[in-house]
Image (cartoon, grey):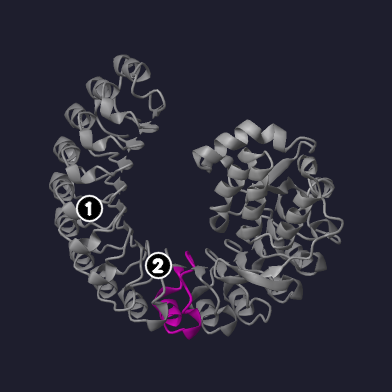
């Protein structure tokens, strides 16, 4: 593949299109101009521009619905792979697909097709389905199903740019078969997670010259160990990688240090090393690496990192481009939180996850007082024992005014902490708030309900908070919660009276999900919820 432009921060390479170019029957009505545009897309499948040009062509030639669908999907190309469940598409995309699916797929066999960037790009299945699919479409994306066998020449994968073979127990032999296939030289995305490939399989993959176009490699849960990580670090063929997931591989500190010292990985923007027991030594190795200065997202959750490791990360000048840092379920404590808060290098962070680190009220207060963290939009401090004092410190912080998501579950903040958050003018941009398992009670629920500062909330989780009917009634009567689409009150004690109050609330008309599991709701409350004119579009759990 030859270089042909920039997309998502990396240099794209022109794909070698298998000849003759195959397009599905729907496109034939538009003649040779459409075929020319589709060939340009086939040559540059990761580039949004040819797809947008195609959308304009369709708009001008009597196919506005397909044009709109392509434009909507192009917006999500950078964060999608093509195999996501269509239920998670935005509503308008789902509507267009459901309305026009049969028309757009007319003439195609009944395979499990993959749609990406508005076009039919691939298939879910094995060699038989793949060979059939490529007779009808330009096959660019493949998800191998559990029964697939990876062996032989694999010629049916020629031209594929994204391959997912997750949880198939390929083992080292399967990894070697893929590595030895010259038909995979167009691959830019490879997901081999949960395949037990071990160090031998990892070595085979990273020594393959046919995988030199990879930009995304997912090897999570493969037991590659330090030896596999070292082989990856020494590979001459992975210089185009921008996303690397090695989570849950037992690579340890030595494996991480090898990765950190590798100039081959200097183009990485996303690195996931969660669940690898790297400890402070591994964190230090990452912090000291000049090769990782392009990182934007770093996941180090569940790694036995303590305050020393957090300090090293906080003091690293090479991590100043980070926008997302996940240190959840480590052991950094208040000292580690204070180090992060005082860092002069982490000013670009927009997402910080520190759940399960026992930072306490002191750690929360340090974060709240940090001007370095003023760009945060997402902050997760769940399971940290911050108490009411920690919640109050966060509530009083002018530096957290950009927060849209705040997770404080299981922190013992009580009613006092909930009241402090509700009264904070600095949290007015919040759209998602999780206060589950905090014993806020009716008083805390009432305080939240009365807050004009929480009017932008769309998701509110108050599960397992000892909220009774009075708290539910307060929430139901709140004009400030009318933008809520998701409300979780599971594991409380609202009973029939609370259920009836929710059912009668005109302010909750935008709800699509309401969780009322384990709330002692009887027949009367269930009937009120089912007959509510305000909850007709809402899925109610727990009836």
Q: Quadrant of the N terminus?
A: bottom right
- Does residue 453 lie above or below 538 as drawn? below
Residue at image coords 40%, 23%: 536
Number of numbered markers: 2
Q: Which mark, by number, is residue 233? A: none
Q: Which mark, by number, is residue 323? A: 2
Residue at image coords 29%, 72%: 340
**Residue 538 quadrant:** top left
Q: Hey, which residue is sitting farthest front in the picture?
A: 60
Q: Which residues are magenta?
A: 273-297
Q: Position of residue 426 (x, y in %)?
A: 19, 55
**Residue 335 quadrant:** bottom left
**Residue 447 quadrant:** top left
- Does residue 69 lie above or below 253 as drawn? above
Density class for disc 2 (Cα within 10 Å; few <14, some 14-19, many ≥20) is: some
Side (left or right) of 205 relative to 528:
right
Density class for disc 1 (Cα within 10 Å; few <14, some 14-19, many ≥20) is: many
- Does residue 520 lie above or below 303 as drawn? above
Q: Quadrant of the C terminus?
A: top left
Residue at image coords 61%, 33%: 98
Residue at image coords 27%, 25%: 506
Side (left or right) of 192 relative to 471:
right
Q: Nearer the viewer, residue 219 or 226?
A: 219
Residue 282 belongs to the span the image colors magenta: yes
Q: Nearer the viewer, residue 63 or 307?
A: 63
Residue labelled with disc 1: 427
Q: Position of residue 59 (x, y in %)?
A: 63, 44
Q: Earlier in the sequence, mark 1 or mark 2?
A: 2
């Amino acid at each position: 593949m030859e270089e042909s432009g920039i997309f998502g921060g990396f240099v794209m390479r022109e794909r070698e299109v298998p000849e003759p170019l195959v397009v599905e029957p729907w496109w034939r009505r538009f003649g040779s101009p459409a075929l020319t545009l589709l060939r340009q897309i086939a040559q540059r499948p990761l580039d949004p521009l040819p797809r947008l040009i195609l959308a304009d062509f369709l708009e001008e030639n009597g196919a506005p619905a397909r044009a709109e669908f392509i434009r909507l999907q192009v917006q999500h190309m950078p964060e999608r792979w093509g195999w996501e469940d269509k239920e998670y598409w935005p509503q308008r995309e789902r509507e267009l697909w459901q309305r026009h699916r049969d028309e757009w797929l007319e003439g195609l066999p009944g395979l499990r097709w993959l749609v990406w960037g508005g076009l039919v790009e691939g298939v879910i299945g094995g060699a038989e389905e793949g060979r059939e699919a490529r007779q009808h479409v330009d096959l660019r994306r493949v998800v191998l199903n559990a029964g697939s066998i990876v062996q032989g020449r694999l010629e049916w994968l020629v031209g594929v740019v994204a391959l997912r073979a997750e949880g198939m127990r390929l083992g080292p032999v399967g990894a070697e078969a893929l590595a030895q296939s010259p038909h995979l030289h167009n691959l830019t995305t490879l997901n081999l997670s949960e395949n037990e490939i071990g160090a031998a399989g990892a070595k085979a993959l990273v020594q393959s010259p046919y995988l030199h176009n990879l930009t995304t490699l997912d090897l999570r849960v493969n037991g590659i160990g330090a030896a596999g990580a070292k082989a990856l670090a020494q590979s001459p063929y992975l210089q185009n990688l921008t996303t690397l997931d090695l989570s849950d591989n037992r690579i340890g500190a030595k494996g991480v240090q090898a990765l950190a010292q590798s100039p081959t990985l200097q183009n990485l923007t996303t690195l996931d090393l969660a669940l690898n027991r790297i400890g402070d030594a591994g964190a230090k190795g990452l912090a000291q690496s000049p090769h990782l200065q392009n990182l934007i997202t770093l996941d180090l959750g569940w790694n036995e990192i303590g305050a020393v490791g957090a300090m090293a990360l906080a003091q690293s000048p090479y991590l100043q481009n980070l926008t997302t840092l996940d240190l959840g379920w480590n052991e950094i404590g208040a000292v580690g939180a204070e180090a992060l808060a005082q860092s002069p290098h982490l000013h670009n962070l927009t997402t910080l996850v520190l759940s399960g680190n026992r930072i306490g009220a002191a750690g929360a207060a340090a974060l709240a007082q940090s001007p370095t963290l003023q760009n945060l939009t997402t902050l997760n401090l769940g399971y940290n024992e911050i108490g009411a004092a920690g919640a109050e410190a966060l509530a009083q912080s002018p530096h957290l005014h950009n927060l849209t998501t705040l997770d404080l579950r299981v922190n013992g903040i009580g009613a006092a902490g909930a009241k402090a958050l509700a009264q904070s003018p600095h949290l007015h941009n919040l759209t998602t708030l999780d206060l589950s398992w905090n014993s806020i009670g009716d008083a805390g629920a009432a305080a939240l309900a009365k807050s004009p500062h929480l009017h932008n909330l769309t998701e509110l989780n108050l599960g397992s908070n000892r909220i009774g009917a009075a708290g539910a009634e307060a929430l139901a009567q709140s004009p400030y919660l009318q933008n809520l689409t998701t409300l979780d009150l599971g594991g409380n004690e609202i009973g029939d009276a609370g259920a009836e109050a929710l059912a009668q609330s005109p302010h909750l008309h935008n709800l699509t999900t309401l969780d009322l599991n384990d709330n002692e709701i009887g027949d009367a409350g269930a009937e009120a919820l089912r007959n509510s004119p305000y909850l007709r579009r809402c899925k109610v759990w727990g009836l």
